[in-house]
Image (cartoon, grey):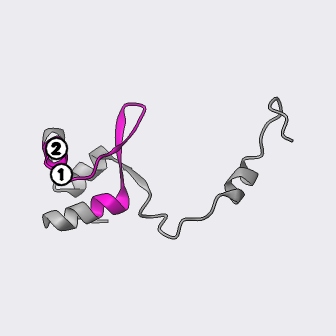
Amino acid sequence: MHDPLQPTDIGAINDDAPASPNSSDDELIQAATCRKMAGNISSMTEWRWRRAGLLPEPVQIRSRNYYRKGEFMRALRNLGTSATE
């Protein structure tokens, strides 16, 4: 049993997790980067597109928005916006 007062071997934790076959799709990218990829849109346009269901809901971490790369790229393709990877 692991003693909670002893440091945990981080490598052992990561080795137990199954590797995702689409790990690049699960990569989180900042909302600002996504706005640039979508043609340098404003944060208000991003919000409107999200509200209209054109963009997926972001993941919030410490009050900042991040998108899963795969979901965001699919949404851009559906919008017909050219995006660079």
Percent of width and height locating residue 67: 34, 50
Q: Quadrant of residue 75?
A: bottom left
Label 2, label 1: how far apart the Cα atoms are: 5 Å
SS at mark 2 in the image? helix
Residue range in magenta is 45-73
Mark 1 highlights which residue?
A: 53
Disc 1 residue type (three-letter): Gly
Q: Quadrant of the C terminus?
A: bottom left
- Percent x, y of residue 77: 20, 67
| Residue 13 numbered tag | none
How far from the left and from the top, in percent, is residue 53?
A: 18, 51
Q: Is residue 65 magenta?
A: yes
Give the amino acid at mark 2: Arg
Residue at the bottom extreme, as displayed? 21
Q: Camera-side residue: 11 or 50?
A: 50
Q: Is residue 84 left or right of residue 39?
A: right
Mark 2 sits on what residue?
Answer: 51
